[in-house]
Image: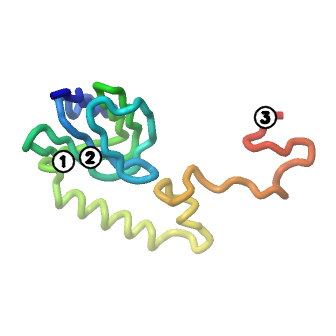
Amino acid sequence: MAKLQVELVTAEGRVLSEEADFVRAPGLGGELGVLPHHIPLMTPLRTGEVLVRDGNREEFLFVAGGFLEVLPDRVVILADAAERAEEIDEARAEESRRKAQQLLEQRPPDLDTAVASPAAPGWPGPWPSPAARTPRCRSWPRRC
């Protein structure tokens, strides 16, 4: 049976390099499932869980953003950050969540968190209204 060569890489180094039958990753538009001989594609990833399955063995990893490249015999994940599920320190994760919650509570009242968050629907962000465009240039992003 055909296999996929799976590589998961961060700026710190290689997190995973192995063969697999199936990979599931969190794409911006939803979960992506990849089997051998998949059509080539490249897509951004959102924060979430990656599943790598080889036979009966499953490995779960956490990724925080990045990109997924799929070739017929290979999957490459370039992640901003990644960690194997068994290596996640729950105390550290809880402390990070608590700090993030404190920052949200201290935010200025005029800050629109949906616009400021890269995980918000519609990312990469708000586009200017037609009134904000100059009369001489009606395209966005501006190319004139």
Rounded to the nearest angstrom, the CA distance separating label 2 from label 1 is 6 Å
Name which of mark 3 and mark 2 comes first in the sequence: 2
Q: Percent position (x, y) of residue 89?
A: 16, 54
Q: Give the amino acid at mark 3.
A: Arg
Q: Nearer the viewer, residue 42 or 90?
A: 42
Identity of the residue drawn at 33% across and 26% down: 72
Residues at marks 2 and 1 touching, judged by CB atoms closer than 8 Å: yes
Residue 107 visible in the displayed image: yes
Q: Percent position (x, y) of residue 25?
A: 32, 46
Q: Which residue is mark 3?
A: 143
Q: Nearer the viewer, residue 125 or 4?
A: 4
Residues at marks 3 and 1 touching, judged by CB atoms closer than 8 Å: no
Side of 106 where 74 appears, left or right: left
User: Looking at the image, which residue sits at the far left?
Assistant: 56
Q: Nearer the viewer, residue 83 or 8?
A: 8
Identity of the residue drawn at 38% across and 36% down: 68
Q: Could you tell me which secondary element the residue under label 1 belongs to?
A: strand
Q: Give the amino acid at mark 1.
A: Phe
Name which of mark 3 and mark 1 comes first in the sequence: 1
Q: Which residue is mark 2?
A: 50
